[in-house]
Image (cartoon, rainbow, N blue to C red):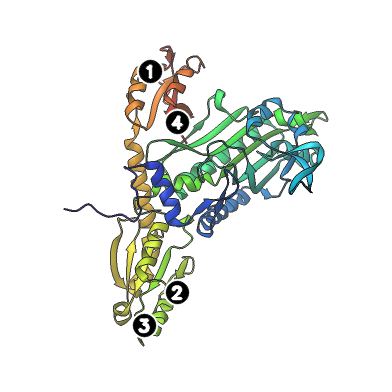
Amino acid sequence: MSEKKHSLPVTREEDFSAWYQAVINGADLAENSSVRGCMVIKPFGFAIWECMQSILDAKFKELGHHNCYFPLLIPVELFEQEAEHVAGFAKEMAIVTHHRLEYKDGKFVPASPLETPLAIRPTSELIIGESMARWINSYRDLPVMINQWCNIVRWEMRTRMFLRTSEFLWQEGHTAHETEEEARLESRTMHDVYHWFIRDILKMFCIAGEKPAHDKFAGAIETLTIEAMMQDGKALQAATSHYLGQNFAKAVNIRFQGRDGALHYAHTTSWGATTRMIGGLIMAHADDDGLNLPSEVAPYHVVIIPILKGTDQDGEILEYCQKIKASIQKDARVFVDLKEIPSQNKKWDYVRKGIPFICEVGINELKNESVFFTKRASELEKVRMSLGEFAARLGYLIREHDEVLQKKNESAGQQKIVRNIKTFGELRDYFSRSNGFVLAKWSGSEKNLDLLDELAVSIRCLPNQQTGTSEKCILTGEDATIDIVLAKSY
């Protein structure tokens, strides 16, 4: 029996890294740019990001947040006001030191030094906080709840499309509150929003929890994270939410007159998710034929491909394609591909793009008023049904598509959860031969954390759901009650 042929030139089993890049190329998501470490997000890749944006943006607004925009360039001296924060980003910052070019010795060179160097934003806590300090005078001005969609620059030495690039797209929410309780509730609420989005919209197997103190966001009191498991068993930090306490408020003087008449510093939060979620989609759902998109972030739910033979009936086939489109519910995204390339090439193009349903329409479908389609999530299963049935059942088919993806990902994730590792020796042995999420006990001490560096493993989070049971710490052998997730990561 011959091996099944796949659309991609390399499989996950052969080379996971090369396969990841092959999915990006096959789905035409992005390409490297002429700027080192940066990428061009192509139309189909950006359409996926737009779907993500629209869902999250609607949720943010539903919860009372407002969109705004702040400068790309931030005075370096502003970062000096929060030492822990700047230390966390110092090695990643890109700095603008000159303005104006002049032509000299046959080439353009920077001409005029800036009096104050400007950082290209690595994140916006301080510059947004500076504005909040002007906006907030009284407790009546609180809470301030804003979000911006923008680009970020963090200078990376080793880059990988969508997962780690020097420039990437994200949203960053920033809020200021009267009390610690309100701010902590906000950070937890947004953590829950991200958990919902990653688990229920993107259909990715994930664990929600808190980052250990040594790995929290620079300047934060508490960092909450969603750790998604990829098909190779590694973790992807998919989104984070931070309670910042009064650290940033004190740095930039966000003060308000309280109900007691005294001046108080605001309690602030920040939270964000990036285009690395597209990388997560690839590594969670794609197969050896390409991308496999959950319906809510698929630019199209249905693509209709006319099969034309250069006969007098081609016009009727094209009309029938439009009839199929017109019969489909209005909230479904449908595209009729009229490009003049072979229909079989089109089909495999959309398989690689992960479109849930790919309809091929030829003379047989025209005569029988039927629809012949491929179900992307179900091992490219081929189905034929009447047009009326297809139109009536599409909503169910879309839900079924998502359930298949979610169940497949959940099952694969659960198989890579390991609960029986009790000692560091067992941990070393496991990660020398496999990858997955190891659930273990930790004392909370930072002692022996360097042992994990030897394995390229880290504590990904302290899961929100703690068992409360007592065992021995996997790093120190001391009594421990804290549950942790250990994994290799992207």
What type is the residue that disc 3 sits on?
Gly
What type is the residue that disc 2 sits on?
Leu
What type is the residue that disc 4 sits on?
Gln
- Marks 2 and 3, how far apart at CA: 14 Å
Secondary structure at badge 3 equals loop
Q: Which residue is mark 2?
A: 338
Q: Which residue is mark 3?
A: 310
Q: Which residue is mark 1?
A: 424
Residue 319 against residue 14 in the figure, above or below? below
> In this orientation, does residue 423 appear?
no
- Decide: marks 4, 1 in contact (CB < 8 A)? no
Q: Which residue is mark 4?
A: 465
Crowd tier of the residue under label 3, counting other residues whose Cα lies within 10 Å: few below 14, some 14–19, many 20 or above: few
- Marks 4 and 1, how far apart at CA: 23 Å
| Mark 3 or 4: the one toward you | 3
- Marks 2 and 1, how far apart at CA: 59 Å
Residue 389 against residue 399 in the figure, above or below? below
Crowd tier of the residue under label 4, counting other residues whose Cα lies within 10 Å: few below 14, some 14–19, many 20 or above: few
Secondary structure at badge 2 equals loop
Q: Give percent across and percent down for residue 322.
A: 44, 77
Furthest residue toward front: 105
Secondary structure at badge 1 equals helix
| Mark 2 or 3: the one toward you | 3
- Marks 2 and 4, how far apart at CA: 51 Å
Q: Give percent across and percent down for residue 331.
A: 49, 65
Q: Give percent across and percent down for residue 101.
A: 78, 48
What type is the residue that disc 1 sits on?
Phe
- Please tell me which residue is depicted at 46% across the width and 68% down the height of the picture: 334
- Decide: marks 2, 3 in contact (CB < 8 A)? no
